[in-house]
Image (cartoon, grey):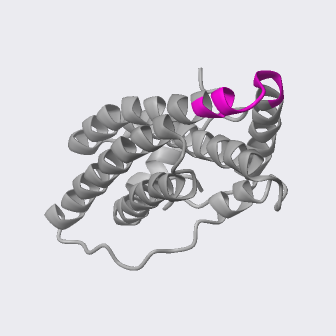
Amino acid sequence: MLGLKLPTDPRWAHVVEENLEEILVDHAYCEQKAASTAISFIVTYPELNDLVKSMSSLAREEMSHFEMVHKLILERNWTLGRERPDLYVRRIMNFFPKGDDRMKRLIYRLLVAALIEARSCERFRVLSENLKDEKLSNFYSELMASEANHYTIFLGFARKYGNRKQVDDLWNSLLEFEGDIIREFAEPGRIHG
């Protein structure tokens, strides 16, 4: 369903289990950035009423996810700490050319957002199926459905606002590129690394 070219090795979850504080902090920031992304769509494309409405709802949902992850951090007597750069997202964002017209940039941004949500969904599934910590396993199982929904929202808007064949070609090229990136990354304390 997600179209990802390289699935996450389930052993990644076992490495994550040794770094739970790091993964929860990274996850909290991923949720915060997802809310910021939704707000950015509203600010940049206020004339697209259906997009604004959807992104407003999405921003609230992502912040509620941030609050849930932050609560898990606090329950374990950890602190949020400082945000670290997300090299995976930086690489993905560099896939598309800069400076195209406004609507092309919208399509690019929607596809990048869809991909990030798809990878998050896939990683949450791996965590839900492999973590020994039952509370976290259940937590990631519940979040997995939300991430899948977010992925379809972004991909749906890209297809709505762009030419379907061109969008699907771009999407497939982005998926191939992301598969190559995932082969390079090996950061166990990251949702996307």
The part of the chain drawn in magenta is: 157-166
Is the residue 174 above or below the residue 30 in the image?
Answer: above
Q: Nearer the viewer, residue 21 or 164?
A: 164
Q: Is residue 133 left or right of residue 55?
A: left
> Which residue is located at x 65 percent, y 59 percent?
88
Q: Nearer the viewer, residue 72 or 160?
A: 160
> Which residue is located at x 73 percent, y 32 percent?
162
Is the residue 82 above or below the residue 46 in the image?
Answer: below
> Which residue is located at x 51 percent, y 31 percent?
153
Could one spot residue 121 in this view of the protein?
A: no
Quadrant for the N terminus in the image: top right
Residue 36 colored in magenta in the image: no
Residue 162 colored in magenta in the image: yes
> Residue 173, position in %: x, y?
83, 37
Q: Is residue 161 left or right of residue 172?
A: left
Total marks placed: 0
Q: Nearer the viewer, residue 171 or 74?
A: 171
> Residue 38, position in %: x, y?
47, 51
* Quarter location, residue 179: top right
> Residue 191, position in %: x, y?
50, 53
Give the dominant element type of the magenta stretch: helix, strand or loop: helix
Is the residue 149 above or below the residue 18 in the image?
Answer: above
Residue most extreme to the front: 47
> Residue 73, position in %: x, y?
24, 63
Q: Is residue 68 left or right of residue 56?
A: left
Q: Is residue 63 left or right of residue 155?
A: left
* Quarter location, residue 9: top right
* Quarter location, residue 32: bottom left
Q: Nearer the viewer, residue 127 or 58?
A: 58
Could one spot residue 185 in this view of the protein?
A: yes
> Which residue is located at x 23 percent, y 39 percent?
134
